[in-house]
Amino acid sequence: MTAETSSAYLRRLGTWDAAAIVIGGVIGGGIFRTASTVAERTASGAQLLTLWAIGGLLTLAGVLCYAELGARRPHAGGVYIYLREAFGQLPAFLFGWTMALINYPGSVAAVATTFADYLCAAVGLDTRMWVKPVAAGAIAFIVGVNFFGIRAGSRMLNVFTVLKLTAIALLVVVGVVLAHGQFGAVLATDTAHPVAPGAFFGALLPVLFSYGGFHYLNDLAGEVREPQRTLPRALGLGLGGVVICYVMVNFAYLAGLGHAGLAASQAPAADLMRRLFGENGATVIAIGIACSTFGYCSIAIAGGARVLQTMGADGMLFNAVGRIHARSHAPRVALAVLGGWAIVLVVSGSFGQLVDYTTVGEWLSHAFGIATLFWYRRRFRNEPSPYRVPFYPVLPLLFVCTVLGVIIVTSIKSPGDAGMSLALIAAGAPVYYVWRAWQRRRAA
């Protein structure tokens, strides 16, 4: 990253703002749905809660590694910057090609559609007619707010993070009330629901995917105040809060629905609220889920745009994408490109396969991103770092090996999606060489 690009962003995000980005980036709509999948693959409430705790600890290992990487290189762009410095332009471009141009807009389109589904259901709009316009309008609104800079986007995010946490607290209270003091049954074995040997590891997959999204803060590191102190603190506080929320919500599901009821539910949050408040309760939690998904879209758009802008400043995309607005200090062109492409995916309805295809690519980026920590430690062994991940090299190795295990299991279960994901990544290589050749001819 050039000095000009690095200094063009203003460091306006404090610890709470940064922690809210971590919380909002991880807690989207997954926890309101994936708990049922985890229950299907476990035999007791004790197993289920243990899985969510293990998933949180494994993710915390990755977060601590990202904290050191962010403290070493507190610039916008996150993993793209680490890969570029450690492994060169081609691996960095392949990451940016996959994530910023495919995964980010694909996930934004998918989650914005989920937001529209819940919002339309809550206010009584015809979902067949209104879901796409509402989803596209939400994306356009988020992009418009972020045009005014990170401070405006952060204020909006803070509001939706509070609403998201309020919805989670409500679920926990309802679960405790429905338990009628019989909390021992929460951990009981579900004798009517036997599971196959090895299903425990398979149940870890949706847990780890629900903990994804913690990397968005590193994408925005160029706008964090005192990043060497704030990034580690915010990443730890944010993910610690997420782990507590996830374990408590699953405790509430088990307390209110039981293990068998949770395994059979298609919408556990709505079913839990419906048991105490009827359809009005289901409507209230639908609004809460809509707030949660809207907050996620805001973070994904802001973080993805910074990756695009950094690539543009490096000459990996058109120069206009690398520009930062002089007054708002926002990457307006990158925001417009990312938001516009996400809206195209919403209207066309083609985001579903994109998200499936790029899941493996996203987790590969985490593995390679954290692997750069070994390069930084070796290359700058005599350079003091403001933060160092504890238990090095155990924690980075643990996270990288776990992620690679998840990728292997995913490839076995869904070889078509994994193959397409790798094909999409590989397709970036000829694009990179053609782009570089075009740049050389243009310069000549």
Image (cartoon, grey):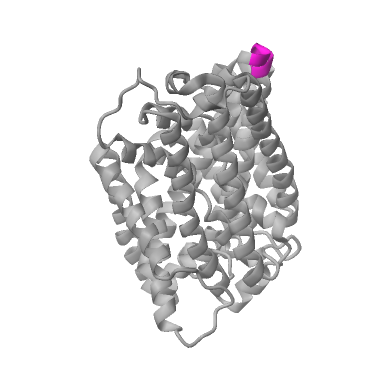
Q: Is residue 219 visible?
A: yes
How far across and how far down the image is residue 71, in percent?
Answer: 57, 71
The residues colored magenta run 276-282
Direction bottom: furthest residue: 382
Screen quadrant of the C terminus: bottom left
Name the chief secondary structure element in magenta: helix
Q: Quadrant of residue 330?
A: bottom right
In the displayed structure image, the side of residue 87 where residue 173 appears, left or right = right
Toward the viewer: 39 or 219?
A: 39
Left or right of residue 385, residue 166 in this image? right
Identify whether 179 is placed above or below 228.
above
State yes or no: residue 279 in magenta.
Answer: yes
Instruction: Name which quarter of the figure residue 298 lies in.
Output: top right
Residue 127: image x %, image y %? 57, 18
User: In percent of the image, x 44 and y 58: which residue is there?
Assistant: 96
Taking the image as drawn, is residue 441 in sight? no
Q: Is residue 128 above or below residue 35?
A: above
Where does residue 404 sit, x and y in percent of width and height?
Answer: 31, 54
* Residue shown at the point (70%, 60%) measured from the top left: 15
Residue 189 belongs to magenta span: no
Please name the residue shown 56% across and 73% down the image: 387
Between 13 and 382, the residue placed more toward the observer is 382
